[in-house]
């Protein structure tokens, strides 16, 4: 037995629950990469117009930053509205369940 440990013979790996496997995370990673590539393409097409130099212009940098910021704010707002709708649906289900006598 180690200091602060238990006399249980489980290893540390057994005591800590394993996270999702790579195969289980793959659809989420694919969706993230799909969205990342989509927003990169949209902002690039909207903002990058001059291919005569190696660096982006101040206008292009500002445009890309604004494009990404707007995308993130819209995504955040959509997520908030989705959460609000889910909470409302859950509340409605509880009320309906109470009316039917399923909940006390």
Image (cartoon, rainbow, N blue to C red):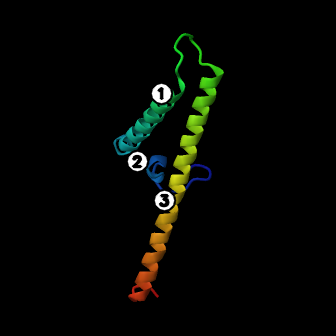
| The image quarter in which residue 102 lies | bottom left
Graded by Cα atoms within 10 Å as few (under 14), some (14 to 19) or many (20 or more), the crowding at tag 2 reads few
Percent x, y of residue 58: 65, 22
Residue drawn at x 42%, y 76% as measured from the top left: 93
| Mark 1 in CB contact with mark 3 (< 8 angstroms) | no
Percent x, y of residue 79: 51, 54
Graded by Cα atoms within 10 Å as few (under 14), some (14 to 19) or many (20 or more), the crowding at tag 1 reads few
Of badges 1 and 3, nearer the viewer stands 1
Q: Is residue 97 above or below residue 46?
A: below
* Picture mark count: 3
Residue drawn at x 56%, y 36% as measured from the top left: 68
- Could you say whether the residue bearing mark 3 is in a helix, strand or loop? helix
Q: Is residue 60 above or below residue 36?
A: above
Percent x, y of residue 21: 38, 44
- Could you say whether the residue bearing mark 2 is in a helix, strand or loop? loop
Graded by Cα atoms within 10 Å as few (under 14), some (14 to 19) or many (20 or more), the crowding at tag 3 reads few
60 horizontally vs 103: left or right? right
Residue drawn at x 43%, y 48% as measured from the top left: 19
Of badges 2 and 3, nearer the viewer stands 3
| Mark 1 in CB contact with mark 2 (< 8 angstroms) | no
Q: What separation in Å lies between label 1 and label 2 (alpha carbons)?
A: 36 Å
Question: Which residue is identified by label 1?
Answer: 45
Question: Which residue is identified by label 2?
Answer: 20
- Could you say whether the residue bearing mark 1 is in a helix, strand or loop? helix
Percent x, y of residue 77: 55, 53
Give whichever of 58, 21 is nearer the camera. 58
Please report whichever mark, 2 or 3, sits nearer to the chain's N-terminal start.
2
Of badges 1 and 2, nearer the viewer stands 1
Q: Is residue 55 above or below residue 27?
A: above
User: Which disc is residue 82 wearing?
Assistant: 3
């Amino acid at each position: 037995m180690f200091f602060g440990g238990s006399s249980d013979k489980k290893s540390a790996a057994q005591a800590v629950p394993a996270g999702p496997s790579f195969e289980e995370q793959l659809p989420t990673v694919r969706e993230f990469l799909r969205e990342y590539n989509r927003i990169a393409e949209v902002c690039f097409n909207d903002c990058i117009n001059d291919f005569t130099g190696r660096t982006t212009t101040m206008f292009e940098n500002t445009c890309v930053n604004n494009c990404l910021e707007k995308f993130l704010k819209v995504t955040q707002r959509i997520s908030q509205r989705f959460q609000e709708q889910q909470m409302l649906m859950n509340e409605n289900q509880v009320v309906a369940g109470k009316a039917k006598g399923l909940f006390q």
